[in-house]
Image: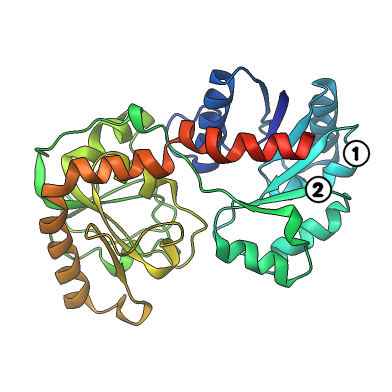
Amino acid sequence: MKITMVAPGVYPIPPQGYGGIELVIWNLRKALIGEGHHVNIVNLMGGGNSIAKRWNIVRAINASCPDVVHIHASKYFNLARFLRGANILFSDHSPGVSFEEYKYHRRAKVKGAHTLCFSEKIKEFYAAVGIGRDFLHVIPNGVAVAEFSFTEQPKYPDRSICLGVVSKRKRQYAIADLPNIDFAGPVNEPVDFLDGAYQGEWSRQQVCRNLTEYANKVLLTEAEAHNVACMESLASGLGLVISQNAADNLDTSLPFIDVVPDDKIHDREFVARIIAKNRAKSLPLRKEIREYAKRNFDTEHVVKTKYLPLLLSIVL
């Protein structure tokens, strides 16, 4: 099968540091090639959102003569009407669904196009605004579990890591002054961290190597589709302390996953207590945590059991 994936054109593929969508695309490509399929990536960077750039994307897709075109950037959904003979699959990677995202689907006007949703919540949104359920599919993001270092004896057993773009949406500001938390990621909006807590912007190699040296990961985001860094943390053997908006696709009954209620996000003592308890619970369960990641979120597993069957059902 010939598959063309359309990326946002914001970061290079494979990403050298930050780039969650780009990483998902790259991992899918590797797993699909491993299954004997041909994968082409269209990721035109620069040029803004000009008409010339959009036509270059269309030409690049049509030149590859794909069986399936998987568009991973909602701003390009409406290019689908200009594609010749391919089956269309949309993925909306935005952190939360809204009428704004739905408008992209309406503008696409492609009969028979399918939409890949990263959680049941997103699927129900699109169903509620009129997209047929036969064209909606729930598949979680995957990560390459084997690429992440793993140890049962982390260097920082008494510390947590908050990995991701520093922004209002990710709410690092709510925990910036709590002790025993390190932060890593590009800074979009400045935050006053405790001395020594900010570790800079990690490269992809540093992410894969460094995560396992912490006891758990903290993510109290306002909105999230299906956070890749959480899957990476599980692959590295870390427990999770997350907001309700980051809990999609996770089994929150497991002892190493704690969800902070929305009305407690700004309760510093409550949050600090939950983080400390999660560290203690998660440390002896690191093998179990990594196995949970393998069983549920390893890209090869996701591709074999969910993504490829979906593509074959679309093509056939």
- Residue on which the image places disc 2: 113
Q: Quadrant of residue 180?
A: bottom left
Residue 139, image x, y percentages: 56, 48
Q: Quadrant of residue 258?
A: bottom left
- Please state if 298 lies on the left or on the right of 54 as rendered: left
Which element is circle 1 on?
helix
The residue nearer to you, when weighing 56 against 136, is 136
Mark toward the start of the polypeptide (2 vs 1): 1
Q: Is residue 187 above or below residue 316?
A: below
Residue at 16% in and 34% down: 151
The N terminus, quarter of image: top right
Q: Residue furthest bottom?
A: 263
Residue 152 appears in view: yes
The C terminus, quarter of image: top right
Residue at 85% in and 49% down: 112
Residue 47 appears in view: no
Label 2 and label 1: CA atoms lie apart by: 13 Å
Residue 226, image x, y percentages: 48, 54
> Any mark on residue 82, and which?
1
Q: Are marks 2 and 1 in contact (CB under 8 Å)?
A: no
Residue at 49% in and 39% down: 19
Q: Look at label 2 and name its amino acid.
A: Ala
Q: Is residue 259 above or below residue 216?
A: below
- Please state if 255 lies on the left or on the right of 12 as rendered: left
Q: Neighbour class for label 1 at 10 Å: few (<14), some, many (≥20)?
A: some
Residue 68, image x, y percentages: 76, 33
Residue 261, image x, y percentages: 34, 76
